[in-house]
Amino acid sequence: MFELTGKRVFVAGHRGMVGSALCRRLASENCEVLTATREELDLRDQQAVETWFEANRPHVVFLAAAKVGGILANDSYPADFLYDNLALETHVIHASWKHGAEKLLFLGSSCIYPKHAEQPIREDSLLTGPLEPTNEWYAIAKIAGLKLCQAYRRQHGADFISAMPTNLYGPGDNYDLETSHVLPALLRKAHEAKKRGENEIAIWGSGTPLREFLHVDDLADALVFLMQNYSEEAPVNVGSGEEVTIEKLARLALETVGVEGTVRTDPSKPDGTPRKLLDTSRLAELGWRAKTPLREGMADAYADFASRAGQ
Ligand code: GFB
């Protein structure tokens, strides 16, 4: 088991949904958590990253910083999704090796797998077929990050590992209707329908795509578990096994918010990949399983949204 006790642990991206969940989770490990705001350290600036690592010399790195967004943001800003992610992961992974970090965990995404991968998606289906076009820019950057970890392990013996989470949600999510992922968007749409006294929400696409959702606190727990218990080249999928259609998710959002309403589809908007269910047997064999049921997790996410919206 890899010990976190007494270590300096850098959480890159600590203000994001995943990074902040990691900080909450690491509070119960006996370690020193290092963070840097975007204003203090632009991870896309290689010199700044070098200088920061030289000064702080973390023993452990969780690479949770990333340019992320939902299907429309991915499709609209391909240069940002490719460049920002390639730049920051290259700089952090290289500096971690150069300045002697003992271990690094890189965070990928389930969209790295081929659009028509056999379901549930096993880790070894990586690079066996074409990607989903709406997010191929992000996926290519995440594949490059995973490969960097493998390359530094092979060439330099660096203990760098990768985790591939399914679609995430929870406290600290982005609720902007243009750039967010589907779950926060639907909670917000249901919330606004309730405020306006309406009984219908509109969803993008056909409503038939299937997605698996994982609460971010479960993910953070899995990442700490992997840091302590896993040390191999292959990436590890992190999922909940809880899969729903987008239409069902919209009905769950209405129930969570307390609206008796209906769901209208919008076929002019993209569906993206038809299904994205991760095979999590590798993680289960190591001894970890998700705990939060979707209905319970959505209530928690909505409480966070409502408190931030001042409701
Ligand atoms: O969460 P989402 O944006 O991303 O969309 P992906 C999931 C599904 O929900 C798609 C539908 O079929 C959307 O068309 N959807 C319905 C909506 N209504 C809405 C809405 O109001 N907002 C949004 N955003 N979607 C992302 C990738 O793919 O998944 C990223 O683009 C990343 O790169 C992330 O991998 C985890 O699941 O399609």
Image: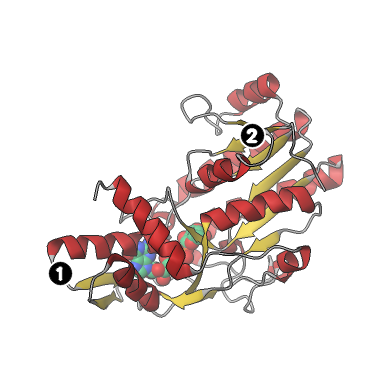
Asked which secondary structure carries label 2, the reply is strand
Amino acid of disc 1 = Glu
Q: Secondary structure at mark 1?
A: loop
Compared across the picture, whether 295 is left or right of 146 comes to left
Q: Amino acid at mark 2?
A: Phe
Q: Answer yes or no: is residue 241 visible.
A: yes
Q: Earlier in the sequence, mark 1 or mark 2?
A: 2
The residue where tag 2 is placed is 10
Marks 1/2 in contact by CB < 8 Å: the verdict is no
Q: Residue at x 58, y 37 (%)?
A: 12
Mark sitting on residue 198: 1
Label 1 crowd (10 A; few <14 / some 14-19 / many >=20): some
Residue depicted at x 63% and y 42%? 28
Spot occupied by residue 126 in the image (x, y as percentages of width and height): 69, 66
Q: Is residue 175 above or below residue 158?
A: below
Q: Is residue 20 left or right of residue 54?
A: left
Image side of residue 287 versus residue 201, left or right: right
Residue beneath the point at 80% across and 54% down? 233
**Distance between mark 1 and mark 2 Cα atoms:** 46 Å
Can I make out residue 175 in this image? no
Q: What's the colour scheme?
A: secondary structure
Image x and y of residue 91, in percent:
64, 35
Q: Quadrant of ligand 1?
A: bottom left
Instruction: Tell me which residue sits at (56%, 29%) in the image.
Output: 45
Q: Which residue is more in the foreground, 18 or 86?
A: 18
